[in-house]
Image: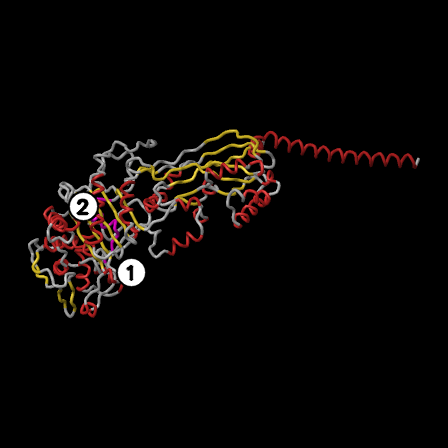
């Protein structure tokens, strides 16, 4: 009986355990079923997308960079085929041995070895590592011939930026180079290893336009990330082509003409619309070096060169304008009521208190009117009328002519120059303005600074009386008429005085630039010489007799300047040249301007019309 009772108890215990286990299993299966329903039904789309993302690898494709052409369609910056040699570790078997074999065909430095070994060890075995870029066709051929002895080595084709004119156009175009960490903006295109962006000049100013929009390639990959096949490909949108106002051949001529000087700059403009035909600065550098690779020695040489080849002196060089500033002073004097026939006697100096202010001509010019003061560049006459006009009126006129502020040219790195006023000096130095400073400023010395581009703008505005603004890019052909230029507000008879004086500077027997006149009928130029001191001349030096510029150390010589426009009676072109420590404006700068304006007129667009592009069109 006890045994039966014990059996019944065991059966009950077993039944309860079975029910508990069965219930637990039922709950487990219910949970699994619910989870499977959730994953396969409710979340099906989400996990299908994730699975597809694991299978499909989306890779960016860098778009072709837009070309830059001159006003006649001549390419100045373009893309050319670039060949690079790459190495795949899993195919090479022994990377160092393969590199040793490759070193017999192309030059590989110890630095290259270390970089390649580091990258092959860090990247997946099937990912290509660039060994060397920008191979010549001869190098490509030799590698291909020796391919059986170079396991894992192959040639890839890409594009690289090329500047056919190199040094003559480098300060206008700038260059492209690899993206630095501080330039990363979150745009994945910038993170592509071979991607380049504009670093200076037009390449930097219009980088986004030239860059275009990235394309993409959809690749099917396996679980290890190895590409199996390409599913689709979108090449993206190529960068926009830019048409510049520059004449590449004229620019080359100007560059060659300046190379006779150690350091110089020049600007040529169309006085009617502000087109910059040439903007040159010497010495320069080869922008292709930044794209194909530059040695530390070359870079250090560029940044340590005392002649500053990396600086675009045409827009960033700030110089005392010397006597080229006298046109602004004359216009200020005319507005102050001084008549053109106002006469001043020049004995070679003027006395103000206990100070003596000298004329460049030691024995003086004698009696001169306003025309004669410009023709013979008399300092004493300008001292007199500058005092009558006052520094604030002179500054106001100078700013109207484009001095003392950025001109608005579409190029980065422009400097504003300096046109002083009473308020400026008080705010800057805490000291009041002195009358003697007005006299010194009147001849373009003292605090006054200007860039060659500003001097060209000043000349263009005097030539046509309109607010000309320089530009480097031609607008697309959109059917709209160009905006009408605003008047500067100068009376025509005032401008006529200055223009007549500039005409006499070059074409009068007593003009300071008579030796550089253009004797071709209809191509004559009008201009103004300038010689600006870079040091103070002491009374002792004057008493002992001034040394000639050629006898002084180069850095102590005067700057030579000349501004001009042509033709005299129908102005079309203007030019400004500054030769650092070049001596006299009449002897050094004026002949350069004469040659440049002759060449500009020879290449007149009436003979060679510039091109304009409809949006999206590419020049032939």
Ranked by sequence position, the earlier of labels 2 and 1 is: 1
Answer left or right for 555 relative to 385. right
**Quarter holding residue 345:** bottom left
In the depicted view, which residue is nearer to us: 114 or 196? 114
Residue found 23% across the figure and 49% down from its top? 592
Name the residue beneath numbered marker 1: 555
The span picked out in magenta is: 448-469
Image coordinates for residue 113, horizontal then vertical, percent: 55, 48
Name the residue beneath numbered marker 2: 565
Image coordinates for residue 576, horizontal then vertical, percent: 23, 49
Way the structure is coloured: secondary structure
Residue 462 within the magenta-colored segment of the rendering: yes
Image coordinates for residue 24, horizontal then vertical, percent: 73, 35
Residue 253 within the magenta-colored segment of the rendering: no
**Quarter holding residue 9:** top right
**For the residue labelled by badge 1, is the local secondary structure a helix, a strand or a loop?**
helix
Answer left or right for 192 relative to 447. right
Q: How packed is label 2: few (under 14 Cα within 10 Å), some, or many (20 or more)?
A: many
Q: Nearer the viewer, mark 2 or mark 1?
A: 1
Screen quadrant of the C terminus? top left
Image coordinates for residue 12, horizontal then vertical, percent: 83, 35
**For the residue labelled by badge 2, is the local secondary structure a helix, a strand or a loop?**
strand
Q: How packed is label 1: few (under 14 Cα within 10 Å), some, or many (20 or more)?
A: few
Screen quadrant of the N terminus? top right
Answer left or right for 116 relative to 459. right
**Quarter holding residue 51:** top right
- Between the C-alphas of marks 2 and 1, the distance is 30 Å
Q: Is residue 281 visible?
A: yes
């Amino acid at each position: 009986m006890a045994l039966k009772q014990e059996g019944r108890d065991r059966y009950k215990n077993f039944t309860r355990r079975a029910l508990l286990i069965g219930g637990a299993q039922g709950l487990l299966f219910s949970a699994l079923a619910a989870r499977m329903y959730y994953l396969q039904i409710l979340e099906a789309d989400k996990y299908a997308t994730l699975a597809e993302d694991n299978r499909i690898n989306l890779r960016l494709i860098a778009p072709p960079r837009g070309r830059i052409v001159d006003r006649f369609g001549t390419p100045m910056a373009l893309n050319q085929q670039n060949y690079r040699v790459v190495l795949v570790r899993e195919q090479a078997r022994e990377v160092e041995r393969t590199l040793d074999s490759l070193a017999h065909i192309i030059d590989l430095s110890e630095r290259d070895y270390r970089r390649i070994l580091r990258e092959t060890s860090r990247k997946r075995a099937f990912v290509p590592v660039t060994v060397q870029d920008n191979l010549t066709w001869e190098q490509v051929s030799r590698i291909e011939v020796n391919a059986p002895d170079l396991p894992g080595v192959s040639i890839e084709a890409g594009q690289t930026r090329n500047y056919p004119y190199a040094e003559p156009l480098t300060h206008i175009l700038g260059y492209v180079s690899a993206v630095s960490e501080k330039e990363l903006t979150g745009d994945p295109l910038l993170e592509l290893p071979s991607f380049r962006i504009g670093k200076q000049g037009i390449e930097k100013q219009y980088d986004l336009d030239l860059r275009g929009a990235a394309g993409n390639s959809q690749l099917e990959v396996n679980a290890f990330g190895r590409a199996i096949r390409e599913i689709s490909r979108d090449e993206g949108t190529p960068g926009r082509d830019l048409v510049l106002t520059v004449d590449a051949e004229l620019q080359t001529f100007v560059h060659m003409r300046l190379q006779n000087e150690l350091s110089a700059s020049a600007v040529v403009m169309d006085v009617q619309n502000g087109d910059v035909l040439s903007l040159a600065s010497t010495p320069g550098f080869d922008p292709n070096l930044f794209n194909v690779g530059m040695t530390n020695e070359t870079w250090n040489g560029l940044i340590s060169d005392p002649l500053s080849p990396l600086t675009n002196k045409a827009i960033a060089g700030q110089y005392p304008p010397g006597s080229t500033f006298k046109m602004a002073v004359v216009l200020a004097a005319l507005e102050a009521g001084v008549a053109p026939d106002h006469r001043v006697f020049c004995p070679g100096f003027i006395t103000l208190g206990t100070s003596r202010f000298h004329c460049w001509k030691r024995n003086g010019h004698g009696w001169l009117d306003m025309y004669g003061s410009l023709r013979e560049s008399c300092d004493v006459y300008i001292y007199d009328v500058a005092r009558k006009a006052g520094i604030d009126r002179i500054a106001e006129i100078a700013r109207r002519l484009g001095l003392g502020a950025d001109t608005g040219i579409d190029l980065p790195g422009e400097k504003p120059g300096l046109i002083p006023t009473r308020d400026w000096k008080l705010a800057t130095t805490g000291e009041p303005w002195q009358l003697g400073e007005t006299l010194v400023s009147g001849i373009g010395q003292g605090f006054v600074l200007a860039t060659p581009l500003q001097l060209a703008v000043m000349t263009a505005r005097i030539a046509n009386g309109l607010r000309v603004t320089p530009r480097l890019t031609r607008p697309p052909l959109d059917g709209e008429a160009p905006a009408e230029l605003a008047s500067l507000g100068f009376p025509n008879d005032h401008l006529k005085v200055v223009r007549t004086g500039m005409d006499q500077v070059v074409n009068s027997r007593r003009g300071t630039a008579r030796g550089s006149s253009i004797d071709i009928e209809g191509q004559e130029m009008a201009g103004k010489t300038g010689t600006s001191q870079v040091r103070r001349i002491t009374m002792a030096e004057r008493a002992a007799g001034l040394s000639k510029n050629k006898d002084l150390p180069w850095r102590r010589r005067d700057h030579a300047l000349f501004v001009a426009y042509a033709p005299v009676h129908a102005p079309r072109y203007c030019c400004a040249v500054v030769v650092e420590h070049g001596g006299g404006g009449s002897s050094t700068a004026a002949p350069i301007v004469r040659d440049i304006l002759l060449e500009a007129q020879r290449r007149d667009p009436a003979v060679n019309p510039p091109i304009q592009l409809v949006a999206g069109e590419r020049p032939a």
